[in-house]
């Protein structure tokens, strides 16, 4: 007895089912990565609110989240106007500090003697606190935007230098030997081998530097500035305006987060062959 053609349903291929299962797992993982930070932030705000309300903390010591939200909305124009100078100083310091670190790391990798002489000097200079270096730079460069950019550049310089040196030296010995057998020049070895090996290390440092640049700019504004998030923090502290103080801190944190996410997106666009960057 023959079976009608309409009743015959071919079984789905095993490969299609596996792909569908893998796609569902990826979707769940993507939503998990988005929901977990949101849950953490919501829990932190709830804990903040509970502590302020439960212990009856005075507003000039620690405001409630609602008071900070009201200040963010009511003084958004002032906050944004002061955020722009800080963002410009942080961006300038980020670019200068990281470019200088990459250039110095390239010199250190190609000259072991220079690395042995100057790397301890760099470590010693980095051990000086930022708040101690800031007044010196203000005395040398004046009270303008230059010392703020310089401080932001200095705090970005060291982590990028260390990771860049490590990445440029983390070359597969067999690949290096192959390049030498093929009579590759130093520039060819650098751009076609060393640089690709160093990119994951470099972007790890850039993610750190993206946040550190904002910290450096804010610290520079503490020493002497009439505008910027750092200046607002000092003024709010002296005036016991804790709601404005917390609002300025939140704005600086959002700026650091935007810089960080920009580096993450740039890394995903450039490093497509490295599985750990997904």
Image: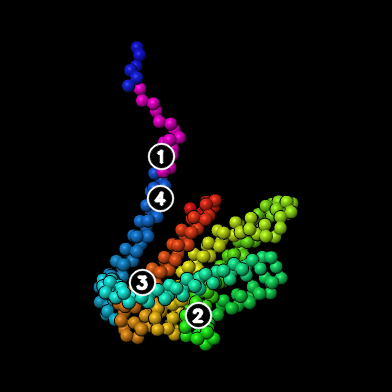
Helix, strand or loop at disc 1?
Answer: helix
- Measure the C-alpha gap from mark 2 to mark 1: 55 Å
What residue does disc 2 label?
146
Residue 54 showing in the rendered view: no
Seen in the image, is 12 located left or right of residue 200?
Answer: left
- Decide whether the magenta segment is chiefly helix, strand or loop: helix
- Measure the C-alpha gap from mark 1 to mark 3: 41 Å
Q: Is residue 146 above or below residue 209?
A: below
- Label total for image: 4
Give the mark nearer the N terminus: 1 vs 4.
1
Q: Which residues are magenta?
A: 7-23
Q: Nearer the viewer, mark 2 or mark 1?
A: 2
Q: Nearer the viewer, mark 4 or mark 2?
A: 2
Give the mark nearer the N terminus: 2 vs 1.
1
- Measure the C-alpha gap from mark 4 to mark 2: 44 Å
Q: Is residue 188 above or below residue 8?
A: below
Q: Position of residue 54 (x, y in %)?
A: 25, 73
What residue does disc 4 label?
29
Q: Residues within 10 Å of mark 2 (few under 14, many from 20)?
A: some
Residues at discs 3 and 4 in contact (Cβ within 8 Å): no
- Measure the C-alpha gap from mark 1 to mark 4: 14 Å
Quadrant location of the N terminus in the rendered image: top left
Residues at discs 2 and 1 in contact (Cβ within 8 Å): no
At 41% from the left and 36% from the top, the residue drawn is 17
At 41% from the left and 45% from the top, the residue drawn is 25
Q: Is residue 19 magenta?
A: yes
- Going by the picture, which residue comes out furthest to the bottom? 139
Q: Position of residue 4 (x, y in %)?
A: 33, 17
Near-viewer residue (90 or 238): 90
Q: Which mark is residue 20?
A: 1
Q: Which mark is residue 250?
A: 3
Residues at discs 1 and 4 in contact (Cβ within 8 Å): no
């Amino acid at each position: 007895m023959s079976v009608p053609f309409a009743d015959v349903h071919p079984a789905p291929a095993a490969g299609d089912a596996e792909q569908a299962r893998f796609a569902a797992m990826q979707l769940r993982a993507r939503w998990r990565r988005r929901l977990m930070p949101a849950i953490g932030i919501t829990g932190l705000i709830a804990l903040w609110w509970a502590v302020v309300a439960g212990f009856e903390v005075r507003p000039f010591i620690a405001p409630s989240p609602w008071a900070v939200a009201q200040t963010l909305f009511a003084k958004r124009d002032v906050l944004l106007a002061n955020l722009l100078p800080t963002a410009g100083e942080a961006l300038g310091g980020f670019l200068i500090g990281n470019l200088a670190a990459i250039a110095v790391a390239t010199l250190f990798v190609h000259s072991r003697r220079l690395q042995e002489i100057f790397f301890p000097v760099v470590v010693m200079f980095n051990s000086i606190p930022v708040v101690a270096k800031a007044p010196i730079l203000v005395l040398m460069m004046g009270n303008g935007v230059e010392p703020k950019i310089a401080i932001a550049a200095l705090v970005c310089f060291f982590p990028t230098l260390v990771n860049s040196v490590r990445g440029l030296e983390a070359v597969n010995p067999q690949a290096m030997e192959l390049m030498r057998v093929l009579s590759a020049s130093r520039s060819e070895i650098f751009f076609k081998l060393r640089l690709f090996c160093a990119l994951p290390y470099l972007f790890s440092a850039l993610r750190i530097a993206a946040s550190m640049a904002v910290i450096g700019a804010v610290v520079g504004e503490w020493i002497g500035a009439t505008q910027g998030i750092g200046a607002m923090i000092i003024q709010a502290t002296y005036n016991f305006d804790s709601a404005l103080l917390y609002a300025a801190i939140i704005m600086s944190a959002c700026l650091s987060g935007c810089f960080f996410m920009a580096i993450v997106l740039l890394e995903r666009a450039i490093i497509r062959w490295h599985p750990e960057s997904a």
